[in-house]
Image: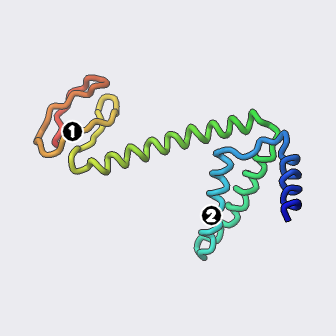
Amino acid sequence: MNQMLEKIRRKTATLMQGRYGIDQFSAFLMKAALVCMALSWLDALSFLYAWGILWIGYAVFRMMSRKFEKRRAENTAFLQINYKFRTALSEYKVRWKERKKYKYFKCKGCKKLLRVPRGRGKLNVTCPKCGHRMVQKS
């Protein structure tokens, strides 16, 4: 049994030589495909099965590719989008936790997100980025 597993491991290693392999984007595609395929069991979402198959196929194509630069560029683009999404999500989590202490609003001049403490009445607020002054109810 161990000899057979060792033989499979060697053949897989030989097959993957010179190939791109798995990265964060391929792992994301595989996970998203599995979620889609699991959701496809619901009658209303049965079309998701085809999407899952397509995403698995694309992930395998990326892993078997020999075009390292293109796959690296795709992964970099994915990581940038993922970073923006995670940053925005963490900002929303902080805003949700502090919703009873602070009121959030955007500056009318530069659209920067500002916060003021709640329960202080009307406040004169100056944007630290652009210097725009406004009266804001807390």
Residue sitting farthest toward the left: 121
Which label belongs to residue 132? none
Q: Residue at x 62, y 37 (%)?
A: 77
Q: Nearer the viewer, residue 72 or 15?
A: 15
Label 2 sits on what residue type?
Answer: Cys
Residue sitting farthest toward the top: 131
- Examine the rendered structure and indicate whether residue 124 appears above or below residue 53: above
Return the x and y of residue 34 as percentages of the image width and height: 65, 62
Quarter-wise, where is residue 131 in the image? Answer: top left
- Could you give the CA–CA distance between mark 2 and mark 1, rounded to whole angstroms? 42 Å
Quarter-wise, where is residue 112 in the image? Answer: top left
Q: Secondary structure at mark 2?
A: helix
Return the x and y of residue 98 as percentages of the image width and height: 27, 47
Residue 70 as seen in the image, left or right of residue 118: right
Q: Secondary structure at mark 1?
A: strand
Q: Quadrant of the N terminus?
A: bottom right
Return the x and y of residue 10 as percentages of the image width and height: 87, 51
The mark total stands at 2
Q: Which residue is mark 2?
A: 36
Q: Residue at x 63, y 36 (%)?
A: 76
Q: Residue at x 88, y 46 (%)?
A: 14
- Examine the rendered structure and indicate whether residue 100 appears above or below residue 71: below
Label 1 sits on what residue type?
Answer: Val
- Examine the rendered structure and indicate whether residue 136 appears above or below residue 30: above
Return the x and y of residue 108 as percentages of the image width and height: 29, 33
Residue sitting farthest toward the bottom: 43
Q: Residue at x 63, y 70 (%)?
A: 40
Q: Which residue is mark 1?
A: 116
